[in-house]
Image (tube, rainbow, N blue to C red):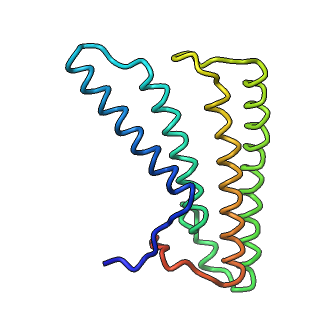
Amino acid sequence: MSTRRPKFRPEAWLATLALIAICLISLGNVIVRYATDASFAFTEEFSVFFLVLLTFSGAAVAARHNQHIRIELIEHHLPKGMLKVVYILQWLAGITVLGITAWYGSVFALEEYQWESLSPGLGLPNWIYVVWLPLMAIAIMVRMTQNLIDRLSGKSHEEVGHES
């Protein structure tokens, strides 16, 4: 039996719910298509939204537990004193990219709200889908910062199980 603690974080729950929603929507659409030779109109729009939500929330969970795919060759061959510099550089690069994503995502969501743009499939307000981009980018930045603090203080996550 695994000794890992469950990851009961909001973004882990969000990822789980998004995955369940994708499965249910897709299964329902397949059943209806085979039974009636028609399909639900909303399935593609919602499935894409839930897939993006799943991706970003999963990235936040991975960022917290140092489980992102990255090149570790440099980390393995540096002296301990230099590791902290590399950790900070990795964090800065991630924060920069996600900060830009959050900023422009916020601007985009605000514009979608102000222009009252509607989604092409169902005609729902587009900002409902777009507002999650900056929110999840901020969540990833928070989890990256928590991970950096742990790495700088020497704490390691027992649940990290990636091969190096």
Asked where in the image residue 89 lies, by quadrant, the reply is bottom right
From the viewer's perspective, is residue 112 above or below residue 4?
above
Tell whether 43 sits left or right of 55: left
* Residue at 66% across, 84% down: 154
From the viewer's perspective, is residue 123 above or below residue 132?
above
* Residue at 30% across, 29% down: 28
Which residue is outermost to the left? 35
From the viewer's perspective, is residue 61 above or below residue 137?
below
Disc tally is 0
Image quarter of the N terminus: bottom left
Which one is in front, 88 or 149? 149
From the viewer's perspective, is residue 74 above or below residue 20?
below
Image x and y of residue 83, in percent: 70, 78
Tell whether 81 sits left or right of 59: right
Tell whether 95 sits left or right of 77: right
Image x and y of residue 39, in percent: 33, 18
* Residue at 56% across, 54% down: 11
Which one is in front, 68 or 10? 10
Asked where in the image residue 106 lies, by quadrant, the reply is top right
Image x and y of residue 48, in percent: 49, 32
Image x and y of residue 164, in percent: 48, 73
